[in-house]
Amino acid sequence: MPHQRRCAVRSILITGGNGGLGLGIARYFLENDETATIHLGVRQNRENAQALSSKFPNRCHLAALDVTNSADWTATIESIVARHGTIDVLVNNAGLHRDHLLATMPDDAWSQVISSNLDSVFLGCRAVIPPMMRQRNGRIINIASLSAILPPLGQTNYAAAKAGVVALTQTLAKEVARAGITVNSILPGYIETDALTEMNDDARKLARQGIPMRRFGTPREVAAAVFFLACQDASYITGSALKIDGGIF
Ligand code: NDP
C-alpha cells in the first residue's frame, strides 16, 4: 500500500494513551502503518489502553508514564530505545483542564494544569532529543489546544499552558532543525472525548453554534493530521501550529 510505504515509521510513543485522543491516534497508526510499533503511555486506569493493546498484542505496548515525572520519562525512553533501537515519534498528548475564574482559582488547579500540560511537554521533549539527535531523525508532535490562541473564560491556567506548548514547539523546532528532527503542534477545537463530559446539552448546543461546521470533531480527524506530521513526507514542516476545529476564528 503506497500510503504505508510513504509514512513508514517504527517506534512511536503516545502519552495519555487511556484517553479519547491518545487512543484514536494510536488506533490510526496501527490501522494505517503496519510497520508502526506503538508505546501507549498510561499512568493508571489502563482499561481502554489495555483493550487496544490486546487487539494488537505485538505492536501496541503499554508504558507506565506519569508525564509530570522526570524519572518516568527517563525510564520509558531508555526502555523503548533498548527494545527497538530507536524512538522515531513522540506524541505529547496527555493533558487535562480544571476550569476556574482566575480570581477564585485554587493554587493546585493552576499548578496541576501547568504541570500536566506544559511541564510534561518540556520533560518529554528533553527526554527524546538525545536519542533523536543520535539517530539524526525524529518527529515530535505536541497536542496543544485552540485555547492557546482563542482562550475562553475560565481557562487562564489551561490557555497559558497550551500557549506555552505552542511557544516551546516553535523554539525547539529551531534548536533541532539541523539534526533532522521536526517539532510541530496541533490545536484541536472541540473533539468528542471524555474531556468534554462536563459540558451539558445547552453548553454543547451553544458551542456548536460557534463552529462553522456546526459539529464537534472526532479523534480520528485529529489522528490523521498527527499521522501526516509523523511521516517522512512531512519533512519540511516544523514549528507549525495546526488548528483542527471545524473553522473557528
Ligand atoms: P481525555 O481526558 O480523554 O484524555 C487525557 C489523557 O491524559 C487521560 O488518559 C489522562 O490519564 C492523561 N493524563 C493527564 N495527566 C496525566 C499525567 N500526569 N500523566 C499521564 N497521563 C496523564 O482527553 P483528550 O483525549 O480529549 O485530550 C488529549 C489532549 O488533547 C489533551 O492534551 C487535551 O488538552 C487536548 N485537547 C483536547 C480537546 C478536546 O476537545 N477533547 C480540545 C483541545 C485539546 P488518566 O486516564 O490517567 O486520567
Image (cartoon, grey):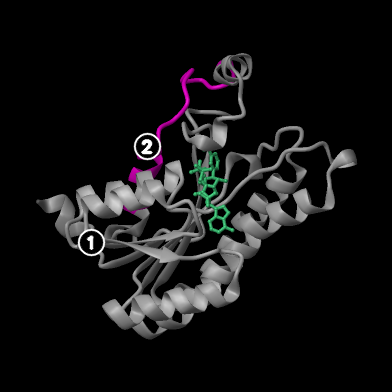
Figure quadrant of the C terminus: top right
Magenta run includes residue 247: no
Residue placed at 15% from the left, 59% from the top?
Answer: 5
Q: Can you give x and y, in whole percent of width and height, for residue 216 in the image?
A: 47, 26
Residue type for callout 2 = Glu
Residue placed at 42% from the left, 71% from the top?
Answer: 181
Q: Can you give x and y, in whole percent of width and height, for residue 81 in the image?
A: 35, 80
- Callout 1 crowding tier (Cα within 10 Å): few <14, some 14–19, many ≥20: some
Magenta residue span = 209-228
Query: Which picture quadrant has residue 132?
Result: bottom left
Residue located beneath label 1 in the image:
59
The alpha-carbon separation of the residues under discs 1 and 2 comes to 22 Å
Residue placed at 65% from the left, 43% from the top?
Answer: 97
Magenta run includes residue 224: yes
Query: Which picture quadrant has residue 140?
Result: bottom left
Marks 1 and 2, the one that precedes in the sequence: 1
Report whether residue 71 is seen: yes
